[in-house]
Image (tube, rainbow, N blue to C red):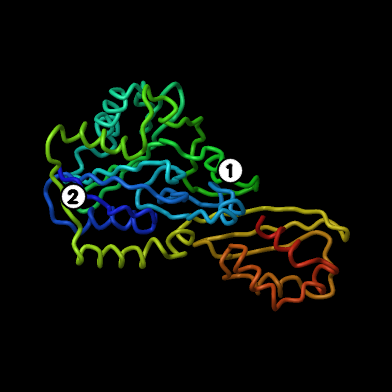
Amino acid sequence: MLYVPNQGLTDPRLNLAVEEHLLRNLDIAEPILLFYVNEPSVIIGRNQNPLEEIDPDFVKAQGIHLVRRLSGGGAVYHDLGNLNFSFITQGKQDLHKFAKVVDPIIKVLRDLGVEAEFRGKSDIFATGKKISGNAQYSTAGRMISHGTLLFDSDLDSLSKALTPRKVAIKSKAVQSIPNHVVNIRDLLLEDMTIDDLQRALLRGLFGAGEIPSYSLTPPDWEQIQQISAERYQQWDWNYGRSPKFSINKSRSFPSGKIDVHVEVEGSRIQAITFSGELAGLRDITELEKGLIGLRYDPTALAQALETIDLHPYFGQLDKAIFLDLLFR
């Protein structure tokens, strides 16, 4: 096995690109190990809808990245107190065998005094609470198994970021399963830093002595930057790839109650209908047609509303309140 240092990167859009590059482009037969720490971010699974996983207002206000990964599974929160690990291997013999993959991690944690155990399909628990979630992805005879280790994360921010709005959404997206979590640092017999934990894992995985490693080259970094720019920095990947879903919302205003039904695919509005107490001065279908094709996010909707007069459709209705009806 070879260890690949990530040179201290904390941008999740680059770290996920490093993973993908190691998986797809690095022609090395030996297993590869990568560790990395991300600045505050929510990493969603390949087949998830972010609107069913996060509080978008909190995420935006706190400057938290939202990035979609290649693998499936649920949403996870990363920050500088969360250590992430990735194993890239040849073949698919360990696909879905999460217990086998994480067993060396569990052994190190137990040596540190943490009573870690494998639970469910892909998680590590300690004292009845989750400390690690794991996922896998395979392609062209290679696979990646990666996971999180909650070491000293901001659990309050984790909870707020991963608490979605209470909106009636219908979709076939994979939804995360909530779990009680705990930081590993609170369970240690002796205190350590996240760097200490990484060193302990390296010793446990490689043994004593020099650790065989591979240093990413300038050509590697060129490909990594390209992957990041073309995938992980793109709205169409992080949001637009969400499975088709629909939302029903209703709100009472001084003029009466308004209901809205929105059909969204590729995170763009495919159909939208309004009903209820409408002003009736203009045909509401004009407005509905004007919203079709827009990104279903507050920024795009707010920009579109700048050039739309809502009064003929709804009477004295403030645009900010109307935006809340559409999205929040």
Judge whether residue 318 can be spotted in this image.
Answer: yes
Say which amino acid is labelled 2: Gly
Q: Is residue 28 above or below residue 230?
A: above
Task: Residue at 65% x, 58% y: name it.
Answer: 327
Q: Quadrant of the N terminus?
A: top left
Name the outermost residue toward the bottom: 307
Left or right of 2: which side holds 103?
A: right
Please state if 219 lies on the left or on the right of 61 as rendered: left
Where 241 sits versus 84, above or below?
Answer: below
Quadrant for the C terminus in the image: bottom right
Image coordinates for residue 39, horizontal then vertical, percent: 43, 51
Q: Which mark is residue 67?
A: none
Which class describes the residues within 10 Å of circle 2: few (<14), some (14-19), or many (20+)? few
Where is mark 2, residue-wise?
141
The residue tagged 1 is 160
Residue type at mark 1 is Lys
Question: Which mark is first along the chain, 1 or 2?
Answer: 2
The residue located at (31%, 27%) in the rendering is 109
In this rendering, the count of numbered labels is 2
Q: Position of residue 212 (x, y in %)?
A: 13, 44
Report the front residue among 292 and 84.
84
